[in-house]
Amino acid sequence: MSNNDTIFALASANGSAGVGIIRLSGSRALDVALKISKLKSIKPRTVYTTNFSNPENETIDYGVLLYFSAPKSFTGEDCIEIQCHGNNIIYNLFFKEFLKYDCRMARKGEFIQRAFLNNKVNISQVDATLNLINSTTERQHNLAIRSLTENTLDKFLVWREQLLEVKTKIIALLDFDDNENFDSAIENIDSTIDKTAEDITITQDQMEKITRIKNGINIVITGKVNQGKSTLFNSLINENRAIVSDESGTTRDIIEAVIEIAGFKVSVFDTAGIRETDSVVEKIGIHKANESIASADIVLNVVSQEEFLKNNRKIPDDLMENEILVLSKWEEDYPLNNKNRTKVFEVSVVKNTGLDELKKYLEKFITDNFVGDYPPILTQVEYIDVVKKCEKLLKKAVKIVDLDIKVEVINEALNLIASITGLTGNDEWIDKLFSSFCVGK
Ligand SMILES: Nc1nc2c(ncn2[C@@H]2O[C@H](COP(=O)(O)OP(=O)(O)OP(=O)(O)O)[C@@H](O)[C@H]2O)c(=O)[nH]1
Ligand SMILES: [Mg+2]
């Protein structure tokens, strides 16, 4: 397989539809278009309506043909777009013809990869396009469309500038170490490093939040066995997904459901009840439950009224910041005297009490924590890793007295930033990024 191949794919979704769009890109695209259409010549950016047929003159379909000549096309190569009737049989008949003319089916993301290699889009636009195509909520769409129109590399370029300035200043000091303003120069350098590190810290937090908005905010329901976790799960997602029974240890595995709260994509997880058990399967379930708590944005700790009254009847003071105490099966009158009431909800699914308050609180929690004026920024996990490493290096650099070592560490940070701003397209994770696209993009 080579990058000189002429590639084709369905650009619209599979299956029956009013219109289906097929794309061809590469040096043979125009020739193929002339062969399968009845057209004598094809001018760029002109709309043609034509019959499409095979060499035996059997009609494949009737539709629209567009030609975008290189380099003024999406991929930067000669591109043909065919708008036909939306139907898999028709698509396959077209593909059979293309194969005869030595074209091949595109790999996932190959069109946009070619656009990237031909400098038609930068990595920031690739990332934003992927987010746009995959967005399922308005918030995700909003972030993606902003990233597509604004430059998500800006932040990295600013940091690069600042660190290059730091580097130049350190080198100047190395050359003239009898500089009478040495101390103030060092102070100035360190303050720039500090400022950059601070900005990186803030941005890193925003990147994590953006990733959450993109991938889903996690709510994990946990607690001992038989507390009504699965019942709560079913009512939060408005569907009878998890098995509910009065048998302890009903839920063994993690069950996930995706819902939308305040315009955000939210994944709700029901987990195995925590208890001492000899069952191997249940133990695995409990282990998984504990793991999922670690990555939760919100933990719903479910304790039934019976369990609560049996124990010390006290609401713990040490609820985690993201922990909400759900006092379930709360059907007997029992007044609670506790200061920390905002994160405690008495709920009965049977009597339908407390649920609305809990849902409202979840909405508020998510809105307070995730609505923000985020800068357009790259969002792949790999970028966050780079930013984290960079932050660490800068915090280290400020403390280093030896100027030779200091400049070395700054250089390391600069190289990390360059690994993003100067991407060449050969990097392994860039390949991963392109393969996250569907075939046809
Ligand atoms: N009275 C009353 N019963 C409830 C309520 N919520 C759940 N239950 C009952 O409590 C029992 C246990 O419910 P589940 O939702 O299966 O509890 P769980 O915590 O998921 O249990 P495990 O999966 O075994 O850990 C079932 O018989 C439910 O019908 C409630 O609000 N009121
Ligand atoms: Mg359960």
Image: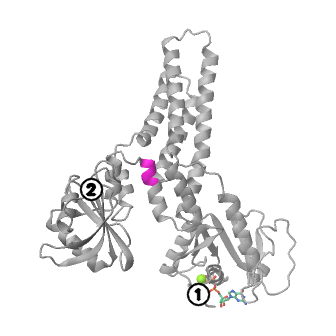
* Residue 168 x %, y %: 50, 22
Q: Which marked residue is nearer to the observer: mark 1 or mark 2?
A: 2
The residue drawn where x is 57% and y is 10% is 179
**Magenta extent:** 123-127
In the displayed structure image, the side of residue 237 where residue 115 appears, left or right: left
Residue 195 visible, this orientation: yes
The residue drawn where x is 45% and y is 54% is 127
Residue 441 picture quarter: bottom left
* Residue 38 x %, y %: 20, 68
The amino acid type found where label 2 is placed reads: Lys
Q: Which mark is residue 140?
A: none
* Residue 124 x %, y %: 45, 49
Q: Depth check: 309 or 146 in front?
A: 146
Q: Which residue is mark 1?
A: 240
The amino acid type found where label 1 is placed reads: Asn
In the displayed structure image, the side of residue 253 where residue 181 appears, left or right: right
In the displayed structure image, the side of residue 297 where residue 254 appears, left or right: left
Q: Which mark is residue 43?
A: 2
* Label 1 close to label 2 by CB (< 8 Å): no
Q: Residue furthest left?
A: 56
Q: Secondary structure at mark 2?
A: loop
